[in-house]
Image (spheres, grey):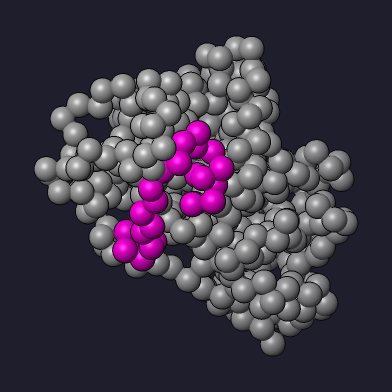
Amino acid sequence: MITVRPGSHAYRLLQLLIITGEFPYRALGILGSVKSLLDIVYKMQTVQHIKLKSEDTILKTRLFQMSGKGDSRTIRLNKHALKVLNDIHPDARDCYLASFPDNRFTGQRFNIWRNHRVAESVAMCMMAGIETAPYLLPDLQNETNLHVIPEIPCFYLARNFKSIMEMELNKTTFTRVNGLVFYPGGSYAVYNTRDAAMKWSGGGEMKAQLHITDIVRRNAGLKDGVSSALLFGKDAAVVLQTVEESDRSRKQDARFDKIYLSIHYIPMTQNGIDLLKILIVPDWREKIISSLFPPEMRPNGYGSMEYDAYWEERIIFSFLDSDIARLIRFNKGLKFEKQKTTEEQQSNEQEQFEVVCYPWQQKFVKEFLCLKVKYTIVEMPEILEALGIISPEGGDDEYEG
């Protein structure tokens, strides 16, 4: 006999499927030990006796089912196991059926992949301690300026805000945004490029950003709306490809780093989960910079390029927030400086610039920057400790692509 206990792998997967309907087989590592999760999924595809606490009965059924092949292989709830959802929350079953009537899904690859991108985004947020359950969050509204968002980090699916402005729906129907993350003092639009370069829809994404900004102002009281995004992906090479696709765009105002001034690349690994926890701490940017650089190293002005500290004639840039848009601006500054320097000065260029980053970021940054720079490596636990964060038990180090 099985009891689905809170905190267990099966419980976590159930919570996720209530929200997203299905989850990619290849991304189980986000949720914890792949071996343990596979054992549970395969076991729960056979008939089990499941004790229901909500009804004090025993349900004889399969809990999960898998279908598809390759990238489309997907995990879903068995239609006879919906009673188990009441053990998660009294409103969980109704929430699930409202999104996935009759427990039916399309077999079209495009729709499956879209659901998988959303599911991975939700899983990463869930593992970082962000509230993702719709039945535990207040509904968004568009009637007036009300602070309805709770004072905790929380995630709203795109379908939650696409439906509240019927006249504006055509502006967001085809956007690639997965959802919105709110945290005390800020918000992020959420995207997931997975393992393929994202080709942004330009004008469509600009309209979507304006729509999202209005929602953020009305529901969270944030005057600046949303000017930052989280970009989930398999690895840094995908980000490089996405940047290159953006460079080819004829409409430079529609570049992704023009639509969002900050774009934080989040790898779908334990490193990404820890980074996400950092990015939802109130006033996290100032806390990170203050922990790295004393006041005498902080610049009074930024001049011709963006950086975080200046010491002994060296410009220092922190990439600890994994902000791709900021890194692009820093690289443009390097190119400008390179044009001004002589060949002799360029031979000493490594002494002029410094980048502070995590070990897993260094290869990507080296490939991207136009100049050689000095690297200072900071371990993630140092920043977690500086911000008072205890790293959670999260996914495996590798995302199974």
Question: Looking at the rendering, in which quadrant would you find the N terminus?
Answer: bottom right
Residue 161's x, y, as percent? 53, 31
Expressed as whole percent of the image width and height from the top left, the position of residue 201 reads 65, 22
Q: Is residue 281 left or right of residue 294?
A: right
Residue 5 lies in what quarter of the image? bottom right
User: In which quadrant of the rendered image does the C terminus lie?
Assistant: bottom right
The mark total stands at: 0
What residue lies at 79% left-to-right and 75% top-to-bottom? Answer: 42
Residue 52 appears in the picture as rendered: no
Is the residue 17 above or below the residue 333 in the image?
A: below
Is 330 displayed left or right of 283 in the figure? right
Whether residue 43 appears in this view of the structure is yes
Which residue is at 61% across, 38% downward? Answer: 240
In the depicted structure, whether residue 265 falls above or below residue 77 = above
Residue drawn at x 38%, y 48% as measured from the top left: 374
Task: Locate residue 45, reporting x and y percent.
Answer: 81, 72
Q: Which residues are magenta?
A: 361-384
Furthest residue in direction left, as rendered: 296
Closest to the observer, 245 or 133: 245
Query: In terms of image quadrants, where is residue 377?
Result: bottom left
**Which one is nearer the viewer's eye here, 321 or 314?**
314
> What residue sits 30% from the left and 41% below the top?
316
Is 372 magenta? The answer is yes
* 80 or 199, nearer to the observer: 199
- Whether the magenta-drawn stretch holds residue 353 is answered as no
Residue that lies at the very extreme toward the front in this rendered image: 344
Provide residue 254's location: percent of width, then percent of height. Answer: 56, 17
Task: Please tell me whether residue 361 is drawn above or below residue 34 in the rendered image.
Answer: above
Is 209 left or right of 144, judged from the image as shown? right
